[in-house]
Amino acid sequence: MLGKDEAMPAARCRLRIGLLCAAAALVLFAAPAGACTPTPLPMGAQGPDLCYADRTWSEPTLGGRELQQQFDFYRVPATTPTPLIVWAHPNGMSKALPANSPMHQALVAPALRAGFSFASVEFRHPVTNEALANSDVDPRVPHYDLAYALQFIRANAEALNIDKRNVFLVGQSRGTLAVWTALQDDLRDPDSTDPVARQSTRVNAVYAVNAQTTYSGAEFAERFIVPADRAKFVAAFNRQHPKHAQFGSAIASVSAGQKPDPPLRLIYDSPEVGRLLTLEQISQRDPIHYPDFGPALCTTYAQAFGNSARCTYDADSRYQGDPGAAFAGYVDFFKRHLRPSASGGERP
């Protein structure tokens, strides 16, 4: 299992999700076809396909489509820096959020109305993309794309007119890698000669829908499977996922220390189970979006922080298939965690 204090990969450009697995117009600042080279962004940059790092990969959940480390940026017209929401998509989707889509209406539209700029990131995932080869410069399956995107965006804060002190993560399913990312130690290297590497990977708060709060089969079994069936579950999981030891766990990463982990709001589209299940019972459910992931993480938060206010969840079937319901109020949640801007006062 990947510990929070484990050493991070040295090189920058190197994250079936889970356990068992725009009406702003877009102005183009696209990378050349077939290439993605991260360079400082021009003032006023916005639109699709802004490049934050230089890796490409074949995405199994999109029929092997070749993807790049890019993000789409929706800019709020403003004379002062704006807070930023960074979105991480579920499997079967890309970073694209067409203006007439339910996801755009649930995510981008309310953010822009509230004065938040919005970035939608393309990223690799430690479970979905575990087949990607480890290498000397990328010694583990990919975990850190969301973190690298945060650093690149912060390094280009002036060009994007965003407030580095007010950055938030929102994700769904695969994109709830945002939770794991937010709970890791800061990748910031203040002594680096690279201006991107000098930026923080920490965020103010995270809102996640159908979040996997551990990628460890052993931890899943310990928390959710009856004792008699745990060994069989773990053996099957480990056979399916040869790199399982590298996957990691948000639950095991919680810290209330000197730099405490951010507030979380977790939404699930089925009711909490609240008891241990047999292998037969778990096989009849969706273990990737298992609703008890939420209370498991929030219980750990409560134990670490001494109260239940910092991590909250709701698990209800009314959210199923309805992004408008699942993400309702997510911007208001983030507004509660805005920090005073550098110029004084709060944004927006």
Image (cartoon, helix red, strand yellow):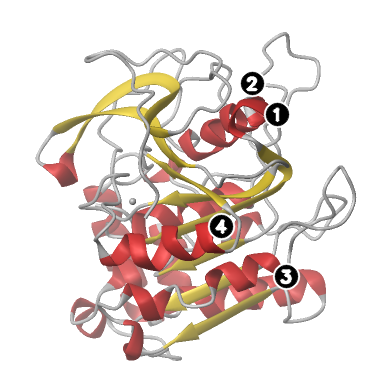
- Disc 2 and disc 4 in contact, CB within 8 angstroms: no
Which residue is label 3 attached to?
A: 336
C-alpha separation, residue under disc 3 versus residue under disc 2:
28 Å
User: Which mark's residue is nearer the viewer, 2 or 4?
Assistant: 2
Does 309 sit above or below residue 345?
Answer: below
- Disc 2 and disc 1 in contact, CB within 8 angstroms: yes
SS at mark 4 in the image: loop
| Circle count | 4
Which residue is label 4 attached to?
A: 250
Q: Quadrant of the C terminus?
A: bottom right
- Disc 1 and disc 4 in contact, CB within 8 angstroms: no
Q: Quadrant of residue 68?
A: top left
Q: Residue at x 54, y 70 (%)?
A: 330
Does 9 sit above or below residue 272?
Answer: above
Q: Quadrant of residue 196?
A: top right
- Please state which amino acid type lies under the numbered disc 4: Ala
> In terms of depth relative to the viewer, which is nearer, 142 or 53?
53
Q: Which mark is residue 196?
A: 2
Q: Residue furthest top?
A: 193
Mark 1 crowdedness (10 Å alpha carbons): few <14, some 14-19, many ≥20: many
